[in-house]
Image (cartoon, rainbow, N blue to C red):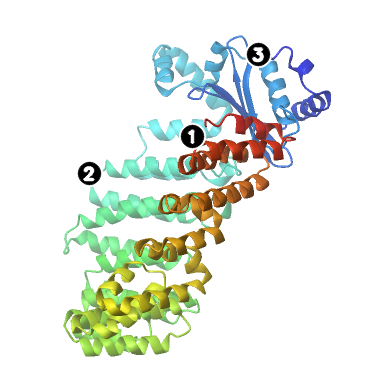
Amino acid sequence: MDLSNFEALIDKAIIDRGYNYFIDNRIDLLYYDEDKQEWLATILGTDEYEVHVCLSNSNEIIESYCDCPYDLGEYCKHQVAVFYALDDLKPTPDKSSEHSISTAEFEKLLNSVTKEDLIQLLLTLSAKDKDLKKRICNQFSFNATPIQKVKNLISSIYFEEYDYYDTSYETFTVPVTEALEICSTIDNPNTQLALYCQLVEEIALFFDDDDHYNQIYLAIEDTLSELTQFIETLSEDSPLRKKCFDSLFLLLEHFPHEQYDFIFEFIDLCIQTANTTDSQTALHSYLKKLQKSSDTFIAEEAPKLIYAFLEKYASTEEALAFAENHIENHFFRELLIKKNIQENQLDTALQLCIEGEHSDTDSPNIVLRWQYLEYEIYVKQKNFLKQRELAEQFVLEDNFSYFLVLKKLTPVIEWSTVIERILKSLNTNTASYYETIYPKILIHENLTEKLLTYCQEFPQRILTYTSYLEKVYPIEVNKIFTLFIYGQASQANNRQAYRNIAPYIQQLRKSCGSKAALALRQDLMNSYKHRPAFIDELSKIPL
């Protein structure tokens, strides 16, 4: 079948529907993929579908596929719509290459064109595209200062001056990247600093626009990353640190406070650059105000920032006293526990852990954090009984590494009782039972009968644990596989889903032999004889 006669070979109803899709411009995208040597199209219908068409040099349709659920015939209306589009395009090998050209080929093409022709082309294009004209001016303006170039690059993406609905990564970040490259070429550190701060200030103006938030976030992130590297090159007593602090602190006071990540990054940079008494006083006062913020998150994070400030600029005793006064904050409790463990003040560390467990009973994950630290203390104290108690609890929290620890800590004569108790507890915990730790324990302890029961209850798990069961229980494995594959077949409703069943049948052949796989495939063909696409995919499976 080729593009000149496909209408005669496809059901008329499908032809009519496909033609309507074609004339209604339902084809959202159509292009030639050089790597796959095929045409790809995106069709907008009740959902978005993808059509693949492979053509010969004479425009014969060698193969076509659509990922829609239609399976009452070989071709659907989406494929027909693409056939009409391709027939209208009359693609040839030469014409296909026009739609897709490599970068190397494009560069070769440009090198073959005269300078005069390229200038004329750019004049023509820039007359129609103001953004392109502005980009060219920004890139090649010899009179503009570096700061002016940065301003020009930022203003070139001001939302009124480009497609408001273009939310692609490049729209915003490419000019910012170019601006950062300008910054990196400047030899004067004062100018560099001014450029970075100018960039941050200009980009921050766009934060109110939700449609471009991701672009703005990435642009600020890249700029602050460059600024951080710049600060790291400065000596502790460099006068530029004071200038840097002044610029950052000014930005900090006017930066949108809902941008938590950047506010905290600004503060961190301010802490690193506050190398004068005046700077430190101003920053400390600002951090204390944050502690009283009506924003709960900022108020909770402020003590951590104050502690970082005190660590750098106050005495050790003052920083430690601040941490102790904020022990209800998980950050400081953990900090003090680890500090006491490091200093071998184990009783104090243990008391802090136990107090944390009692005060955080409503937060199981936080309690678990204190218990892990508590376990670390018991190891140092060589308290094996307490280690065993906590290790068993961690196993029930789905931590397999502590299962191995627990086995080493448990006398052999007691192990069978412990393992039965653990398995019974996990059996009543759906999450742990279904996920990894339950079968991991069965495999480690060579409890194959229990593993078989587990796979019978969750047939899909047979894909993972076949190798542990196939030699001991070949008949049962075959039954579980069959049940699982039938379940997948009953849910499949498009060609890709049918195709996904092939690996399962091949794994069945590997585990239970070709005879079992062939029998199952034939049963599926008989059960789904009214689904030609499924039959076609089943017939392709090499058994």
Amino acid tagged 3: Lys
The type of residue carrying mark 2 is Asp
Q: Residues within 10 Å of mark 3 (few under 14, many from 20)?
A: few
Q: Is residue 484 above or below residue 50?
A: below
Q: Which mark is residue 90?
A: 3
- x%, y% of residue 519? 60, 38
Residue placed at 25% from the left, 77% from the top? Answer: 409
Q: Quadrant of the N terminus?
A: top right
- Say which of 395 and 180 sits in front: 395
Q: Is residue 321 left or right of residue 69?
A: left
Q: How far, Cα to Cα, is label 3 from label 2?
A: 57 Å
Q: Is residue 213 visible?
A: no
Q: Earlier in the sequence, mark 1 or mark 3?
A: 3
* Mark 2 residue element: loop
| 175 or 485: nearer the viewer | 485
Q: Say which label, 3 or 2, has the lower sequence index.
A: 3
Horizontal and vertical percent position of residue 232? 22, 57
Q: Residue at x 58, y 10 (%)?
A: 57
Image disc number at residue 134: 1
Is label 1 or label 3 in front? 3
